[in-house]
Amino acid sequence: MIDVTSDLQALRSRVSEWKHNGLRVGFVPTMGNLHAGHFSLVRLARRHADRVVASVFVNPTQFGPNEDFARYPRTPEADADGLSQAGCDLLWLPTVDAMYPFGAQQAVQVRVPGVTEVLEGAHRPGHFDGVATVVARLFNQVQPDVAVFGRKDYQQLAVIRYLARDLAFPIEILAGETLREPDGLAMSSRNQYLSPEQRPVAAEIHACLQAMKAAVQAGEPLSDAEAAARERLAAAGFEVDYAAVRQPGLEEFGGAARGACVALIAARIGSTRLIDNLEFDA
Ligand code: PAF
């Protein structure tokens, strides 16, 4: 059975007791409303650690003023049950006051340069400052040996890797694979916002990523592959923020795409914004 705490001292003493006994501690930070994708991250953590802590904290500082902070789904009982079954030992549920003792507006901020300025960063100003700020705090609170993040948030993973290295957190960062529905839609807590009419259309995102991959591998110009994806998404009813093929560090290709590539899409259907990506070689 999983233990649950909102008390920082209780969290610290449990983790330090484990470490004192030579146990390796894994960590899976989340915003809750957990699904099979999150539980696969817990199982990955379990394979790399003797004990696993997960956190659930809907972090206000990573939501923009017109984003879905207030309606973000909160399902604490189901989260605790699912985490327990996935092999999580301790659920850390910080309060906003514990996370931001001087208030979110007066918080020390962590800002990662470079990789935060493109794609998601350009479309969601301040988002990655909020993510980096809360993840640095979570790392200090939990002090894990290994932390697991999903590849679905490709750019977030790059931000966390940069943060962990630059601030010398002694934490190994692991990436968990994206889990998909049978039609290819990446699992996400935001999928439940989709209406029954929108849900099948949402699978177009993965189809467009596959189409970009096929076009690039067939030697088509990148700009054509990207434009075709944008047009196809728009025709399906999406408002497209970006459909792009980038180098693994999210730099643009100067000319033709060669070697390791990542295709990324962010698009809105109705009021639901979805992101996904696909890594491949060209
Ligand atoms: O990916 C998420 O769920 C969040 O961005 C994270 C890493 C838990 C930080 O709030």
Image: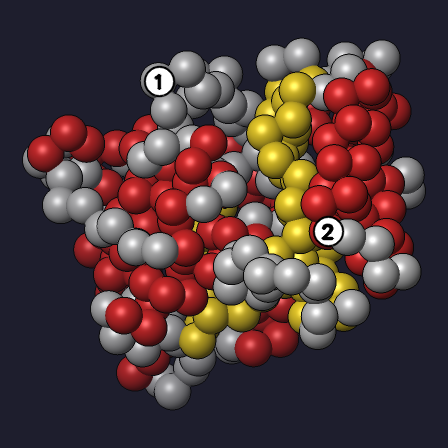
Location of residue 105 by image quarter? top left
Q: Amino acid at mark 2?
A: Leu
Which of the two discs, 1 and 2, sits closer to the camera? Answer: 2
Residue behind mark 1: 65
Measure how far apart labels 1 and 2 are at the Cα level.
Answer: 34 Å
Q: Relative to 201, is 162 on the left or the right?
A: left
**Foreground: 77 or 207?**
207
Indicate the quadrant where residue 255 lies: bottom right
At 89% from the left edge and 60% from the top edge, which residue is drawn? 218
Disc 2 target residue? 222
Question: Which type of secondary structure does the marked residue at label 1 adopt?
Answer: loop
Q: Looking at the picture, does residue 118 appear above or below residue 124?
A: below
**Amino acid type shown at disc 1:** Pro
Q: Say which of 175 and 267 sits in front.
A: 267
Residue drawn at point x = 78 percent, y = 68 percent? 282
- At 30% from the left and 43% from the top, the residue drawn is 129
Q: Is residue 23 left or right of residue 242?
A: left
Q: Nearer the viewer, residue 203 or 242?
A: 242
Q: Residues at badges 1 and 2 in contact (C-beta under 8 Å)?
A: no
Let me know if residue 93 appears in the view: no
Residue at the far bottom: name it.
22
Where residue 194 sits in the image (x, y, percent)?
72, 18
